[in-house]
């Protein structure tokens, strides 16, 4: 089903409900606002039986291959480059995730959710699943603005999910913090949330809960560092986090090779480096495939970004590795200043990081920008940041 952004999520509710209870076919939500070539690649890769357009029109196709018998939803991976992967999620996995999430968020019977993320991504989809599981109808908004949050709260919404970029921009918007504080729970996931933004939100009375997860785990499966009920996370010998439990995907659609590489002994092997404390608390360091090799040293971008995010002069930051003829890669910080009139100097930011991380982890390049470019999911567009000056 082609969906026109976050505001079109309501069209998915009926088909999703039928997919979850087994009376209808599995659904594949696709963002119609993606470039036409990208939409075509997704449809060619996943071969749905039919494509339901933005106006409800249907086009039949020849489906190859079939989904697993209990698959309710296929989520296309959100990366802007590379081969598309379709994550098959069962109704049982989605329901377990929704029930555990509702319990952890403290969502009571009849409490509504605000849906302001695209339902073509797992975070937005799960808002719909939680609503169906809780017997409610979500309030739907095309974007996460202070006005949209206030109007949704007036309509009875008590919970919502955001990506960090939305949180930061709401906190900077007049009335945004006050609107956020009207919600009983604000889930923030999809990428690492900066400590400074979380502190500002909590100081304003916002009940923020950070989440960690991915499409392959039905979205967030670790809340504020604690796995949801039934979920186990452990650190592998290579430093990668491994997740097991009833929230795992069935498989990658039509890709037995990718499935075999991702599922090992009943555990999903993530691409994230992390640590698990003796009490089970999970700390995510960053993606293993984003590690920057600079001058023979390995730098985890997420750790540098976390250090920079604690600087009062920084509103938003993303750290990437860019090619360097001498060092192999250079640590590059793309920064949105807290005060554009007085942006932080590169030396200030390097000094700030040097007090927290080894000197080789300090950014050798700082790019100031008005806004971080993002993907349709709301996550930073790392591919664009690695190759182009903002």
Image (cartoon, rainbow, N blue to C red):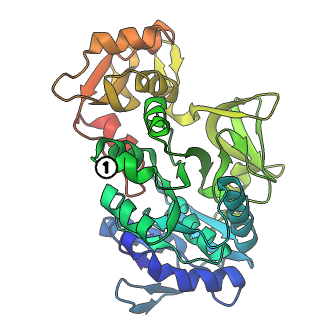
Looking at the image, residue 295 lies above or below residue 136: above
Q: In terms of secondary structure, where does tag 1 sit?
A: loop
Instruction: Write down the quadrant of residue 321 in the picture.
Output: top left
Rendered residue at 49%/45% (across/down): 206
Task: State the image coordinates of residue 370 (x, y, percent, origin top left).
Answer: 22, 38
Instruction: Write down the quadrant of residue 337 in the picture.
Output: top left
Residue 349 falls left or right of residue 58: left
Q: In the image shown, does 177 or 379 lie closer to the viewer?
A: 177
Task: State the image coordinates of residue 272 (x, y, percent, origin top left).
Answer: 61, 37
Q: In the image shown, does 24 or 138 lie closer to the viewer?
A: 138
Q: In the image shown, does 330 or 33 lie closer to the viewer?
A: 33
Number of residues whose C-alpha sits closer than 10 Å to that of mark 1, classed few (under 14), some (14–19) or many (20 or more) = some
Task: State the image coordinates of residue 173 (x, y, percent, origin top left).
Answer: 28, 46
Rendered residue at 44%/30% (across/down): 196
Count of numbered circles in the view: 1
Report whether residue 81 is seen: no
Looking at the image, residue 57 lies above or below residue 252: below
Instruction: Write down the quadrant of residue 35 in the picture.
Output: bottom left
* Residue furthest out toward the left: 341
**Residue at which label 1 appears:** 175
Residue 143 falls left or right of residue 123: left
Rendered residue at 50%/30% (across/down): 302
Looking at the image, residue 16 lies above or below residue 85: below
Task: State the image coordinates of residue 387 (x, y, percent, origin top left).
Answer: 30, 36
């Amino acid at each position: 089903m082609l969906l026109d952004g976050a505001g079109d999520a309501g069209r998915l509710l009926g088909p999703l409900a039928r997919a979850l209870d087994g009376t209808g076919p599995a659904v594949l939500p696709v963002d119609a606002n993606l470039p036409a070539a990208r939409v075509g690649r997704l449809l060619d890769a996943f071969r749905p039986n039919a494509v339901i357009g933005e106006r409800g029109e249907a086009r039949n196709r020849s489906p190859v291959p079939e989904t697993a018998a209990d698959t309710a939803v296929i989520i296309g991976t959100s990366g802007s480059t590379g081969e598309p992967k379709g994550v098959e999620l069962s109704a049982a996995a989605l329901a377990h995730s929704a029930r555990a999430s509702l319990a952890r968020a403290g969502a009571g019977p009849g409490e509504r959710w605000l849906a302001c993320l695209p339902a073509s991504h797992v975070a937005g989809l799960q808002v719909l699943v939680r609503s169906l599981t809780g017997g409610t109808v979500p309030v739907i908004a095309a974007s996460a603005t202070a006005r949209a949050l206030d109007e949704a709260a007036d309509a009875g919404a008590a919970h919502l999910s955001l990506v960090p970029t939305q949180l930061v921009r709401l906190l900077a918007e007049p009335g945004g913090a006050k609107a956020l504080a009207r919600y009983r729970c604000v889930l923030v996931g999809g990428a690492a949330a900066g400590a400074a933004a979380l502190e500002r939100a909590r100081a304003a009375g916002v009940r923020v809960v950070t989440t960690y997860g991915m499409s392959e785990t039905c979205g967030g499966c670790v809340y504020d560092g604690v796995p949801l009920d039934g979920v186990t996370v452990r650190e592998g010998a290579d430093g990668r986090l491994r997740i097991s439990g009833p929230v795992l995907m069935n498989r990658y659609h039509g890709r037995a090779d990718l499935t075999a590489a991702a599922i090992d002994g009943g555990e999903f092997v993530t691409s994230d480096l992390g640590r698990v404390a003796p009490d089970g608390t999970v700390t995510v360091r960053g993606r293993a495939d984003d590690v920057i090799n600079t001058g023979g040293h390995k730098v985890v971008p997420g750790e540098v970004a976390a250090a920079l995010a604690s600087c009062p002069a920084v509103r938003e930051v993303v750290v990437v590795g860019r090619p360097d003829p001498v060092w192999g890669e250079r640590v590059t910080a793309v920064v949105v200043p807290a005060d554009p009139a007085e942006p932080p100097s590169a030396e200030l930011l390097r000094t700030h990081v040097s007090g927290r991380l080894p000197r080789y982890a300090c950014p050798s390049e700082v790019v100031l920008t008005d806004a971080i470019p993002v993907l349709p999911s709301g996550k930073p567009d790392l591919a664009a940041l690695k190759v182009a000056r903002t």
